[in-house]
Image (spheres, helix red, strand yellow):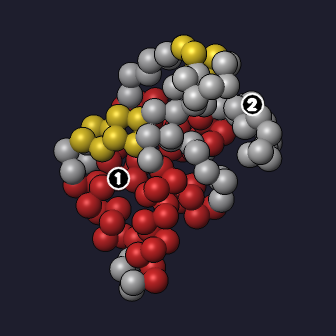
């Protein structure tokens, strides 16, 4: 999960481990699965981390499997929402940035899945 990765990176700083060590490991594995792509607060630091991972894997021609609740579309320009409210007005392009989304488009085949949210909300969702 993307937010778990961010937590691991923050924890590594307190242990004197640079994020480049962890990111290099993520770049070098054959297949990387990222759940909840686009989840987060969309801070400059988060955008830098996802850009570095995607860009380095793109350049190394490595496989990424990703899931997201955001629409597979270029940036819409929708403002970053208060996450307590409906955060899905944005697209994946909004959440990861145009540079990163462009790379994802070049290296990916996207599938849109619709179904019932089994967490009890009763709404339709995309993932």
For the residue carrying disc 1, how many other residues have a C-alpha within 10 Å: few (<14), some (14-19), or many (20+)?
some
Choose top left, top right, bottom left or bottom right for residue 117.
top right
SS at mark 2 in the image: loop
Q: Residue at x 27, y 38 (%)?
A: 63
> Contact, CB < 8 Å: mark 2 with mark 1?
no
Name the residue beneath numbered marker 2.
Answer: 89
Q: In x, y percent, where is residue 61?
A: 26, 41
Q: Which residue is mark 1?
A: 56
Relative to 35, 32 lies left or right:
left
| Residue at left offset 38%, top offset 28% | 108
- Residue drawn at x 44%, y 40% as measured from the top left: 35
Q: Considering only order in the chain, which callout, 1 or 2, is on the residue closer to the N terminus?
A: 1
Residue 53 image position (x, y, % from top left): 40, 53
Q: How far from the left and from the top, in percent, is residue 62? A: 26, 42
Labels in figure, total: 2
Determine the image quadrant of residue 107. top left
Query: Which one is in front, 8 or 44?
Result: 8
Q: Is residue 51 visible?
A: no
Q: Is residue 93 visible?
A: yes
The picture places residue 125, in percent across and down from the top left corner, at: 61, 21
Which residue is the extreme one toward the front? 120
- In the image, residue 86 above or below residue 22: above
The relative height of residue 109 versus residue 64 in the rendered view (above or below) is above
| Secondary element at image label 1 | helix
Picture residue at 50% right of the left edge, 16% below the top: 112
For discs 2 and 1, the disc positioned in front in the rendered view: 2
Q: Residues within 10 Å of mark 2 (few under 14, many from 20)?
A: some
Badge number at residue 105: none
| Occupied quadrant, residue 79 | top right
Single out the residue that lies furthest toward the left. 30
Cα distance in 3D space between marks 2 and 1: 29 Å
């Amino acid at each position: 999960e993307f937010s778990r990765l961010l937590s691991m990176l923050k924890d590594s700083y307190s242990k004197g481990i640079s994020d480049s060590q962890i990111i290099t490991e993520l770049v070098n594995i054959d297949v990387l699965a990222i759940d909840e792509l686009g989840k987060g607060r969309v801070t400059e630091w988060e955008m830098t981390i996802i850009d570095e991972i995607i860009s380095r894997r793109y350049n190394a021609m490595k496989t990424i499997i990703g899931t997201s609740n955001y629409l597979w579309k270029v940036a819409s320009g929708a403002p970053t929402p208060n996450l307590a409210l409906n955060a899905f007005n944005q697209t994946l392009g909004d959440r990861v940035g145009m540079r990163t989304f462009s790379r994802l488009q070049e290296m990916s085949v996207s599938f849109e899945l619709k179904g019932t949210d089994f967490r009890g909300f009763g709404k339709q969702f995309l993932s």
